[in-house]
Image (tube, grey):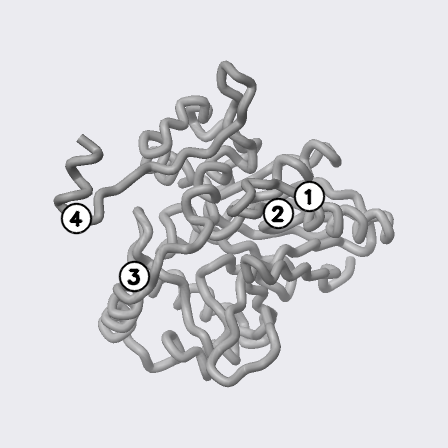
């Protein structure tokens, strides 16, 4: 048995997202984690270049993509999970608490086609569950805080943490989305940082910390414990929560929040076509002041 998986990273700079292709080199069994579906908001044009790059890399190595794993329902990019599944026969998995996220957003977007019991996803992954990948295996860790359904995926000496942590010079995930909780995030981070110091930590995003010129998405537990600007050793829960809540109060919504959520609660499936054959995303309107409110009544 190989001690470590082979890991390829694909960085999508428009959304600052990292997709991972993870394989057991002994058997060629492979998983895709957090794939990106290209989307241009101005033209509403969807593309598959990011997915094609992952598929081509797997084909070049004769790896078989058996599963697509989402660390959560992302709010900053559309998921390419359905496209990968259609092309490879892979199953799609996400954290078992995704139903809580769907319950919040289905009414907001009128997404009545979302299947009950989160059945748009093939498998709901529970804390502590073992997911075999060839001779290796992922261990699922429920790591809520950014959302209620966030999971991290540990395999051998590596862990994929989604949005829970960023590079040490940038900090941690925001907690101001529905279901987010800074106290829960603190507990999740401490759980991750209790892994062995040498554990390689792979992140879903990078936005470059102050003064850094290159993108980066791999670090270690030891480095996070030593240097994470928001969550290093010695920062207690009260201090972390105060810092996180103050920071969140200054953040704008992600640029692709509304389209991303609509697609991602459907496991990467687009909304069904209307009577005219048009597939469309909804843009719920919100009044910014009393005058505008009259327009919505």
Which mark lies nearer to you, 3 or 1? 1
Quadrant assignment for the N terminus: bottom right
Q: Looking at the picture, does residue 247 appear above or below residue 121?
A: below
Q: In 3D space, how far apart are the residues under numbered discs 4 and 2 (Cα atoms)? A: 34 Å
Of all residues, the one furthest to the left in this rendering is 290
Name the element at disc 2: strand
Mark 4–mark 1 distance (CA, rounded to whole Å): 39 Å
Label 4: which secondary element: loop
**Mark toward the start of the polypeptide (2 vs 3):** 2
How far is the residue under mark 3 from the one under mark 1?
35 Å
Q: Which mark is residue 38?
A: 2
4 or 2: mark nearer the eye: 4
Residue named by callout 4? 289
Q: Name the residue under label 1.
A: 48
As measured in the structure, the alpha-carbon distance from the residue carrying label 1 to the one carrying label 2 is 6 Å
Left or right: 17, with 174 as reference point = right
For marks 3 and 1, the one nearer the N-term is: 1
Badges 1 and 2: C-beta atoms under 8 Å apart? Answer: yes
Would you place residue 31 above or below residue 245 in this image? Answer: above
Badges 4 and 2: C-beta atoms under 8 Å apart? no
Task: Give the residue at mark 3.
Answer: 182
Q: Between residues 89 and 294, which one lies in front from this camera angle?
A: 294
């Amino acid at each position: 048995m190989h001690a470590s998986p082979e890991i390829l990273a694909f960085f999508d700079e428009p959304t600052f997202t990292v997709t991972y292709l993870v394989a057991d080199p002994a058997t060629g069994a492979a998983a895709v984690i957090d794939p990106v579906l290209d989307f241009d908001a101005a033209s509403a044009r969807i593309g598959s270049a990011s997915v094609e790059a992952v598929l081509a890399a797997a084909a070049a190595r004769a790896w078989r993509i058996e599963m697509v794993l989402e660390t959560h329902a992302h709010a900053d990019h559309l998921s390419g999970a359905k496209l990968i599944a259609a092309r490879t026969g892979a199953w799609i998995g996400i954290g078992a608490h995704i139903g809580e996220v769907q319950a919040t957003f289905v009414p907001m977007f009128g997404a009545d086609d979302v299947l009950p019991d989160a059945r748009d996803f093939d498998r709901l992954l529970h804390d502590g569950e073992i997911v075999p990948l060839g001779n290796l295996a992922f261990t699922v860790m429920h790591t809520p805080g950014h959302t209620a359904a966030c999971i991290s995926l540990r395999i051998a000496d590596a862990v994929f943490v989604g949005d829970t942590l960023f590079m040490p010079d940038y900090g941690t995930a925001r907690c101001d989305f529905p279901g987010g909780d800074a106290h829960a995030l603190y507990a999740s981070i401490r759980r991750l940082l209790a892994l062995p110091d040498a554990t390689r930590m792979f992140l879903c995003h990078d936005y470059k910390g102050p003064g850094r010129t290159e993108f980066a998405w791999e670090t270690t537990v030891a480095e996070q414990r030593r240097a994470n600007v928001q969550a290093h050793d010695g920062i207690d829960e009260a201090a972390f929560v105060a810092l996180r809540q103050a920071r969140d109060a200054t953040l704008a919504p992600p640029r692709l929040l509304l389209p991303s959520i609509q697609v991602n609660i459907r496991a990467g499936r687009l909304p069904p076509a209307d009577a005219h054959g048009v597939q469309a995303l909804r843009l719920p309107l919100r009044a910014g002041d009393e005058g505008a409110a009259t327009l919505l009544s």
